[in-house]
């Protein structure tokens, strides 16, 4: 048995003692008993601060729930009939959707109001564990491992379901991140090949290969690094 205490930002104190779980809202010391939720994982705030989403196995499989941030009311179950272990919940910036990945290599999101699940992508070689949403909640960017073991970045449109390749198969690219104005996509890529040779054995290694890069997301946006005339 073990004991562990963690505190969420809104003041919800989760106390895990042995295999039981209880919670107490610190504001007014109003107790909220969620022992029936069993184990809880991937708790995360909505962008508007109203909700907390989490994964629980109270029904036997890992399902996604949301509950009000002040701990009042009952948790609302969003998914059902789980067929795989879920990873890393991520709210959309408009707090209307939740994105996650699973062990079946899928990247999916659920619309909070419609409770409708949409598949964004399915990994070719491994799980998709690296994803983010655009500031206007219209795009999802993610990296996935290709069959040649190179990580490649894609963007996916919520409007029409189209997938666009951002990087190629020559260099491993990952950790996509939208700029706050939505004009650029930043990412990390391994493109520096400067081998270091050993002095004691015939061998070499490639170190410090990563740099931060960006791409413009529309034809109208110019690169901040494009050549400028001095005339």
Image: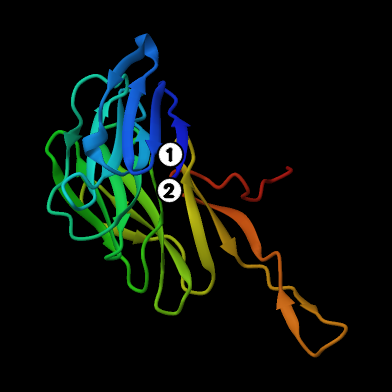
Q: Is residue 230 left or right of residue 178?
A: right
Give residue 147's position: percent from left, percent from top. Answer: 39, 78
Toward the top, the furthest residue is 28
Q: Residue at x 31, y 55 (%)?
A: 101
In screen coordinates, is 7 left or right of 89? right
Q: Residues within 10 Å of mark 1 (few under 14, many from 20)?
A: some
> Could you say which is closer to the camera, residue 208 or residue 5?
5
Residue at 36% in and 74% down? 125
Cα separation between marks 1 and 2: 8 Å
Q: Position of residue 142 (x, y in %)?
A: 39, 55
Which residue carries the number 1 mark? 182
Q: Within 10 Å of the Cα at label 2, are there few (<14), some (14-19), or many (20+) other Cα atoms? A: some
Residue labelled with disc 2: 217
Q: Quick check: 147 left or right of 158?
A: right
| Quarter of the figure with the C terminus | top right
Which quadrant of the structure image shows residue 129? bottom left
Q: How many discs appear?
A: 2
Label 2 SS: loop
Could you tell me if the residues under marks 1 and 2 are in contact, i.e. CB atoms within 8 Å? yes
On the question of residue 135 being in view, the answer is no
Q: Position of residue 209 (x, y in %)?
A: 66, 66
Q: Nearer the viewer, mark 1 or mark 2?
A: 1
Of 84 and 13, nearer the camera is 13
- Give the farthest residue toward the bottom: 202
Give whichever of 212, 64 is nearer the camera. Answer: 64
* Front residue (pair 25, 170): 25
- Give the mark nearest the N terminus, 1 or 2: 1
| Rendered image quadrant of residue 134 | top left
Residue 202 visible in rendering:
yes
**Rendered residue at 54%/70% (across/down):** 171
Its colouring scheme is rainbow
Residue 137's place in the image compared with 83, above or below, is above
């Amino acid at each position: 048995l073990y004991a562990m205490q963690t505190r969420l930002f809104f003041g919800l104190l989760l106390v895990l003692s042995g295999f039981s779980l209880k919670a107490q809202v610190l504001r007014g010391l109003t107790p909220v008993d969620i022992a029936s939720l069993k184990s809880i994982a991937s708790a995360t705030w909505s962008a508007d601060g109203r909700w907390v989403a989490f994964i629980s196995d109270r029904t036997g499989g890992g399902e996604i729930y949301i509950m009000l941030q002040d701990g009042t009311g009952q948790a609302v179950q969003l998914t059902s009939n789980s067929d795989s272990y879920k990873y890393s919940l991520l709210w959309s910036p408009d707090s209307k959707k939740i994105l996650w990945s699973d062990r079946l290599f899928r990247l999916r999101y659920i619309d909070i109001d419609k409770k409708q699940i949409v598949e964004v992508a399915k990994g070719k070689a491994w799980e998709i564990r690296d994803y983010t949403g655009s500031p206007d909640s219209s795009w999802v960017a993610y990296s996935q491992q290709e069959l040649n073991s190179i990580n490649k970045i894609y963007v996916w449109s919520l409007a029409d379901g189209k997938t666009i390749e951002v990087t190629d198969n020559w260099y491993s690219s990952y950790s996509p991140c939208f700029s706050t104005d939505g004009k650029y996509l930043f990412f990390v890529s391994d493109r520096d090949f400067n081998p270091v040779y050993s002095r004691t054995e015939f061998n070499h290694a490639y170190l410090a290969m990563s740099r931060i890069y960006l791409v413009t997301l529309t034809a109208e946006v110019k690169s901040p690094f494009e050549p400028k005339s001095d005339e």
